[in-house]
Image (cartoon, rainbow, N blue to C red):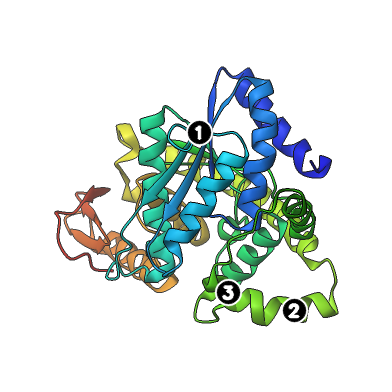
Amino acid sequence: MDPVLLSPLRSALTALRSAGHDRVGVAVSGGADSAMLAVHSAALAAPLGLALFIYHVHHGLFAEADAWAQEVQALGATLGLSTSAAVRVLRVRVASDSGAGIEGAARDARYAALADAAHADGVGHILLAHHQDDQAETVLLRLLRGAGPEGLAAMASASDRDGITYLRPWLNVPRARILQAAAAFAASSGWTAVQDPSNADERYTRAAVRTLLTPVLERRWPGWQAIVARHARQAADSAEILAEVAATDLASLDPSPGMRDFSLAAWRLLSPARQAHVLRHWLRLHGARMPSDARLAELLRQLRQLHAMGHDRQLLWEHGVHRVRCVRGRVGIEARAAGVAPG
């Protein structure tokens, strides 16, 4: 076992056990990264008194998908995990018409399946094998998409989704170290890592960054991933401060219980930058999809114009599965009825 991989993982699992948890899941695609996470987790879980569950999501997008599931089951058996009790193969259907693209739809289906399985098993935490190289790629992708400080913070070491906490203990570990461990494990066990062709398919955005942009950066700035990952940690600190400012601003807007609506007049007293920032914070608070710059600019324009016209005017701004209304000087948010979501 590699001590560099064991150390952050031991800290995460020890914290879980100290908090009274006795079960933990690992998301395993069968690739080198997630397989090594399972291998090192298996070495630590039993001594700590943690039951380990391996979750493999079968997307059905490639002809090799059945073989990949079998490889993960075989890995579980190698680690002494009963395939019937601790290895779960989760079959999902990836929507082709979700509007999120195939990558986004697969991600949504994956998280939904993981949450369902974890809830059924009484598992509250799932380990993910994201590493320093993944973090650096995420920062680049979000930078190219025009993300703000919150977006550039990239992946957090712990995040909540659908009632499950996802832990990423290897965000500061370079992938080269994981591959070294995978090579050693393969040599001793005969195990073979799954090779997902989408990881090298330039039609997929992340794969394009990995195959086209990363080699250039590596030649010019060796070790650039650590530098970019450091920027992500700094952006996370800045995002935390901005979130505190936004929460304070929202609290000053005479909000209703649950923050469902607030005073337009009080919002108008904020600076333009803070008006925009508190709106993003408020939308995020209620689970709304983050609007593009153009969409947010339109909402800002309407709210400012509405104030100039007087409180007897009303506003209706539809966005995804939510709508924002302004009635009698109160800006509120509500869910839209099922149907086609504009915006």
Question: How crowded is the residue under tag 1: few (<14 C-alpha within 10 Å), some, or many (20+)?
Answer: some
Q: Secondary structure at mark 2?
A: helix
Q: Quadrant of the N terminus?
A: top right
N-terminal-most mark, 2 or 3: 3
- Viewer-side residue, 96 vs 225: 96
Residue positioned 65% across, 45% down in the render: 37
N-terminal-most mark, 1 or 2: 1
N-terminal-most mark, 1 or 3: 1
Residue positioned 61% across, 47% down in the render: 156
Q: Is residue 80 visible to us here? A: yes
Residue 327 place in picture, x, y as percent: 19, 51
Residue 306 place in picture, x, y as percent: 26, 62
Give the vertical position of 67 relative to 53 (above or below): below
Residue type, label 3? Ala
Give the vertical position of 221 relative to 147 (above or below): below
- Viewer-side residue, 185 vs 148: 185
Q: Is residue 145 visible to us here? A: no
Q: Which residue is mark 1?
A: 82
Find the distance from the CA under tag 1 to the CA under tag 2. 41 Å
Residue positioned 28% across, 69% down in the render: 343
Q: Which residue is mark 3?
A: 207
Residue 286 place in picture, x, y as percent: 35, 45
Residue type, label 2? Pro
Q: Which residue is mark 2?
A: 215
Residue positioned 60% across, 34% down in the render: 80
Residue type, label 1? Ser
Question: How crowded is the residue under tag 2: few (<14 C-alpha within 10 Å), some, or many (20+)?
Answer: few
Q: Secondary structure at mark 3?
A: helix
